[in-house]
Image (cartoon, grey):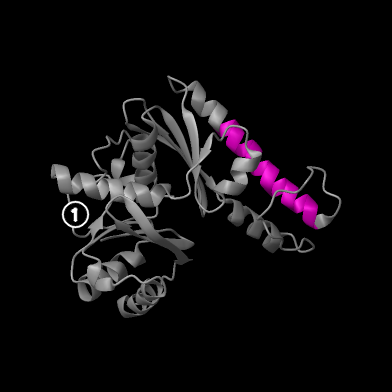
């Protein structure tokens, strides 16, 4: 079986594939100060809870935007799973051309999302990932990664507002308020954050569409994608498992086509 891991600045998502079928996935906090042994204890606990035998995990592929996690997960795979992982970067992008000025600057998660979205839709695309940062990635009709835009994530904005405005409370950002005009402080903050980001998304998508031909489909993924899909008119589909699926696809292509397979890759914060 294949273990896929996407390491973000806030959360790490793991999934187990049996062929093309995703058997199970988990979302955990990204802990920069963990060790390979501690990560092994956590991973084995997750596996055991869902009846996954670690001995059946024969391959691993990882995308990461958190440099300290590279050596931790590399050691975890080598010491506890008995194999070296594949690391996704611009050189191991599943055959997708990266038309960035400096391809090595593109975050691995952005590449993975672009590969998965194009594999499914086979047309020009804007892929929006609502994570620690909100990223917008443009893919051409030919399947080329064109570039994109990066803005602070929704939760970063909400937390910054709480920390820098002394009289404003911390509020939960899970459901859109029933109306834009808030009737109390919490509702006003929720409205400003959620509908404010909806306006940001719609504005950036509109501007990106002016630079793309043919007109792209707009796909969303990431932790808050379901929420934003409800309030953003431009989002046409929400793909919850897009990143995990992209990792599986890239692994399959590397295996089948002999594409570059780095056993260890340095990553950088590019989000």
Q: Position of residue 12 (x, y in %)?
A: 43, 62
Q: Position of residue 236 (x, y in %)?
A: 54, 34
Q: If the image is split into quadrants, where does the N terminus sit?
A: bottom left
Q: Name the main secondary structure of what is drawn in magenta.
A: helix
Asked whether 44 or 53 is in front, the reply is: 53
Residue at x 31% of width, y 33% of height: 99
Asked whether 200 or 244 is in front, the reply is: 244
Residue at x 33% of width, y 40% of height: 115
Q: Position of residue 262 (x, y in %)?
A: 19, 54
Residue at x 21% of width, y 75% of height: 79
The residue positioned farthest toward the top in the image shown: 214
| Residue wearing tag 1 | 262
State the image quarter where residue 8 is shown. Answer: bottom left
Q: Position of residue 248 (x, y in %)?
A: 30, 50
In this rendering, is residue 79 above or below 18? below
The boundaries of the magenta stretch are 186-204
Is 35 placed left or right of 148 in the picture?
A: left
State the image quarter where residue 231 is shown. Answer: top right
The residue positioned farthest toward the right in the image shown: 183
Residue 49 visible in the displayed image: yes
262 drawn magenta = no
Residue at x 32% of width, y 35% of height: 101
Q: Secondary structure at mark 1?
A: loop
In this rendering, is residue 73 above or below 218? below
Residue 64 visible in the displayed image: no
């Amino acid at each position: 079986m294949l273990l896929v891991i996407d390491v973000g600045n806030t959360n790490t998502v793991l999934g187990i594939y049996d062929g093309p079928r995703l058997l199970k996935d988990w979302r955990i906090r990204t802990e920069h100060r963990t060790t390979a042994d501690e990560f092994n204890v956590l991973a084995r606990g997750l596996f055991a809870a869902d009846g996954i035998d670690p001995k059946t995990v024969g391959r691993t592929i990882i995308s990461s935007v958190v440099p300290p996690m590279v050596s931790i997960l590399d050691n975890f795979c080598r010491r506890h799973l008995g194999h070296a992982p594949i690391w996704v970067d611009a050189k191991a992008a599943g055959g997708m051309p990266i038309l960035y000025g400096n391809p090595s600057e593109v975050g691995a998660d952005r590449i993975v999302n672009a590969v998965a979205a194009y594999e499914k839709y086979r047309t020009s695309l804007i892929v929006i990932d609502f994570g620690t940062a909100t990223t917008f990635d443009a893919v051409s009709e030919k399947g080329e990664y064109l570039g994109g835009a990066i803005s602070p994530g929704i939760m970063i904005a909400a937390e910054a507002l709480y920390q820098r405005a002394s009289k404003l409370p911390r509020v939960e950002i899970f459901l859109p308020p029933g109306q834009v005009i808030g009737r109390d402080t919490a509702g006003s903050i929720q409205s400003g954050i959620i509908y404010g980001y909806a306006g940001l998304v719609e504005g950036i998508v509109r501007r990106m569409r002016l630079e793309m031909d043919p007109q792209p489909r707009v796909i969303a993924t990431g932790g808050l994608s379901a929420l934003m899909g409800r309030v953003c008119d431009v989002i046409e589909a929400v793909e919850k498992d897009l990143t995990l699926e992209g990792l599986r696809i890239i692994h399959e292509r590397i295996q089948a086509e002999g594409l570059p397979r780095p056993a260890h890759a340095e990553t950088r914060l590019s989000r």
